[in-house]
Amino acid sequence: MLVVVIANAGVYLDNSTQALPANAAPLAVHAIGYCAVALALVLVDGSAWRPTVPPATDPT
């Protein structure tokens, strides 16, 4: 049931451009919302976005 609820939520993300070209506000809010979510993910889990370099080993 949880999968069905999550899949159904994606349906509503597809209609942000329905009001264009008369009203661009829904599209702008949608784009700003996605940017805010992406920024929050980067700030909360910043270590996942930084490369980890293994320590150098001495070949001798």
Image (cartoon, grey):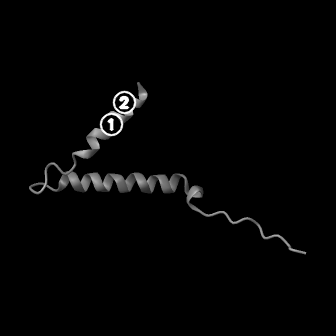
Circle 2 sits in a helix, a strand or a loop, which is it?
A: helix
| Dot 1 amino acid type | Ala
* Residue on which the image places disc 2: 5
Q: CA distance from mark 2 to mark 1?
A: 6 Å
Residue farthest toward the left in the current orientation of the protein: 22
* Residue on which the image places disc 1: 9
Q: How many marks?
A: 2
* Relative side of 50 to 6, left or right: right
Residue farthest toward the bottom in the current orientation of the protein: 60
At 38% across and 34% down in the image, what residue appears? 6
In the rendering, at what x and y percent does residue 60 appear? Answer: 91, 75
Up the image or down, 14 lies above or below 5; here it is below
Circle 1 sits in a helix, a strand or a loop, which is it?
A: helix
| Dot 2 amino acid type | Val
* Relative side of 10 to 39, left or right: left
The answer to which quarter of the image holds residue 25 is bottom left
Q: Are marks 2 and 1 in contact (CB under 8 Å)?
A: yes
